[in-house]
Image (cartoon, rainbow, N blue to C red):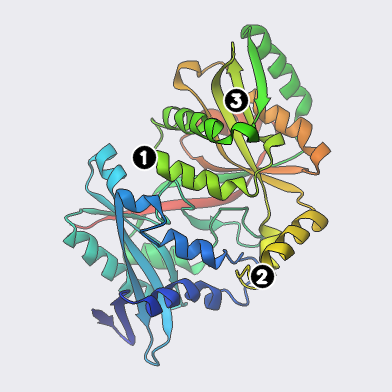
Amino acid sequence: MSGTHSCVIRPVKSRRNLRRFVQFPYDLYRSNPFWVPPLRMDQFEVLNPRKNPFFEHGRMQLFLAFGADGKVVGRIAGIVNGMHLETHDDEAGFFGFFETEERFETAAALLDAVASWLREQGLRTMRGPVNPSLNDPAGLLVDGFDRIPAIMMTYNPLYYKDYLERWGLVRVMTTWAYYIHRKHVEIDRMRRGAAIVHRRNPGLSLRTLDMSRFDEDVATIREIYNDAWSDNWGFVPITDNEFEHLAKAMKTIVDPRICFFVELNSKPVGFTVCLPDINPALQRLSNGRLLPFGLAKLLILTKFAGVGNVRMPLMGVRKAYRGRALDVIPVLETMERGPGYGYQSCETSWVLDNNHVLKNLLSSINAVVDKEYAILETSLG
């Protein structure tokens, strides 16, 4: 236990305090018009070692900050990612699930607690925010506060950046969310480019996600993803169980008509996954609670209010097939077919700042930067 000023930090050790940990953001953002309440059942599942396969190789310590009156005023998690350490061997630990009242002393006390815990685990670097990994919603929002985030993207107050940097964290990576609207995209340029790609790649074909063989297609996506992203900054292979867990969460909302596989001579070499952005409907639910009528209400809101935007959270081309502009094909098909299904726009996120190929592709078709996120770190020496 540690304390600073009027704030006391305690590790979460009881079911009651776990509920407080999950509840705190709903209280903090109660009057914020842009925050989207996540489903509480999902939040408990993420933090449950019996249900979240992250815990097969990782561990977490949750902390709560209590004010002088005994009320929760902040929260944070210290995170050890076993797959990250196995992949990078860099003695890096992480922090995540960071939320705090507008008071620097509270933020500092929370960060101090995690830094101390990570040192006890033998780690020398602290990086984040991740919730709980870079394969999950991650990053600190630093620009784009006046609109709600897309599905599975983070949101936080403006003052978090100041607090984290004042404490000593420094940005090590910037990621971007690009917005593409059918009215403004350079569709003719994309069509000409796609025609060239087809001429240069005999045997090229495209197919959509097949829900009748969903598990098989999910396994293919994971295989391509782990190959395509393996050289990217911060990459950690996603395990079979983690990907199956993610796919199960996506299955309830995925629209297979806008998820594509690029194939060469019937061999899958690339893919894109798009999710209908149901966040506007989620925001109108009863503060993250599905029961007793929430699921029906969510489906009704999604169906009748319309989902005009999709998010493309996953895409990739096998490394052996890079340099052929194959990623143009599924992006074009998303733009061509989307409006017929009611989707007028797409967010592509998050795009690493050093992914110049993807950034150039998006800029060339008139996609615009819509939001900016950061990953920060500091030495624990």
Q: Are marks 2 and 1 in contact (CB under 8 Å)?
A: no
Question: CA–CA distance between discs 3 and 2?
Answer: 36 Å
Please name the amino acid that badge 1 sits on: Val
**Front label number (3 vs 1):** 1
Q: Amino acid at mark 2?
A: Pro
Rounded to the nearest angstrom, the CA distance separating label 3 from label 1 is 22 Å
**186 is higher (above) or lower (below) than 131:** above
Residue 55's label in the rendered image is none
Identify the mark at residue 327; answer none if there is no mark.
Answer: 3
**Residue 169, image quadrant:** bottom left
Q: Residues within 10 Å of mark 2 (few under 14, many from 20)?
A: few
Mark 2 or 1, nearer chain start: 2
The quarter holding residue 98 reads bottom left
Q: Quadrant of residue 261?
A: top right
Q: Which residue is mark 1?
A: 236
Among the two numbered marks 3 and 1 on one chain, the one whose residue lies closer to the N terminus: 1
Residue identifier under label 2: 33
Check the image and name the residue furthest to the bottom.
69
Q: Position of residue 366 (x, y in %)?
A: 70, 35
